[in-house]
Amino acid sequence: MDRYSERVQTLKTMLSTETEFGKVFAYFFDNLGNSREFFDAGKQSKNPNLKMIIEGATGEVFGKDVKVTNITFIRMAKDKFYHGSFFVNGRMATVLYFEELEMGMIAISMGFPAGQMSYIRFTAAKIDPDKAAHFAGNVSKRMQ
């Protein structure tokens, strides 16, 4: 077992059960974000479904005029896990997504004061053979 695999499994559990969303991202950055082995195991990847989900979910926060840019996804094939970053309406954001759970979480920096974040936990399900996805939640929290 890879040294980081147990931490990925802990993250997976936290993503689906934790009610303080900031703790999920703190765990990711504290326990995986500085692991060379973890980052070396991932490969840059595209995921049009996840991109659609991000656009839909962030639209819940910012309204219909949402602009998502500079998306970078890293896929951990062994763990069926994506993590990545993007900008939404010029604000930095991070995404975590587990394929097996069809569940993920987004953290969006809301600007000043520093540390003000909005979080979105989402569940996705394929709804047709064309790989369309559906945003099925609007749970959002703002931490200060």
Image (spheres, grey):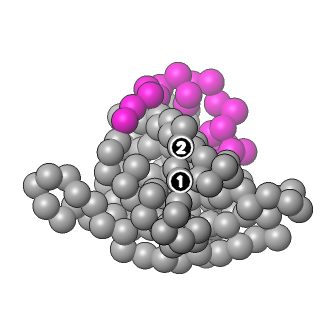
Q: Measuring 62% from the left and 54% from the top, which residue is drawn there?
A: 89
Please say whether residue 11 is visible from this viewpoint: no
Question: Would residue 52 be found to the left or right of residue 12 on screen?
Answer: left
Question: Which residue corresponds to mark 1?
Answer: 67
Question: Which residue corresponds to mark 2?
Answer: 69
Which image quadrant for residue 31?
A: top right
Check disc 2 and report its element: helix, strand or loop. strand
- In depth, the one of 93 and 15 nearer the eye is 93
Which image quadrant for residue 134?
A: bottom left
Check disc 1 and report its element: helix, strand or loop. loop
Question: Would residue 88 be found to the left or right of residue 72 on screen?
Answer: right
Q: Residue furthest front?
A: 65
Separation (CA) of disc 2 from disc 1: 6 Å
Which amino acid type is shown beneath numbered disc 1?
Lys
Which disc is residue 128 wearing?
none
Residue 25 against residue 48 in the figure, above or below: below
Give the residues drawn in magenta, as a range. 27-46
* Disc 1 crowd, CA 10 A, few/some/many (<14, 14-19, 20+): some
Quadrant where the N terminus sits is: top left
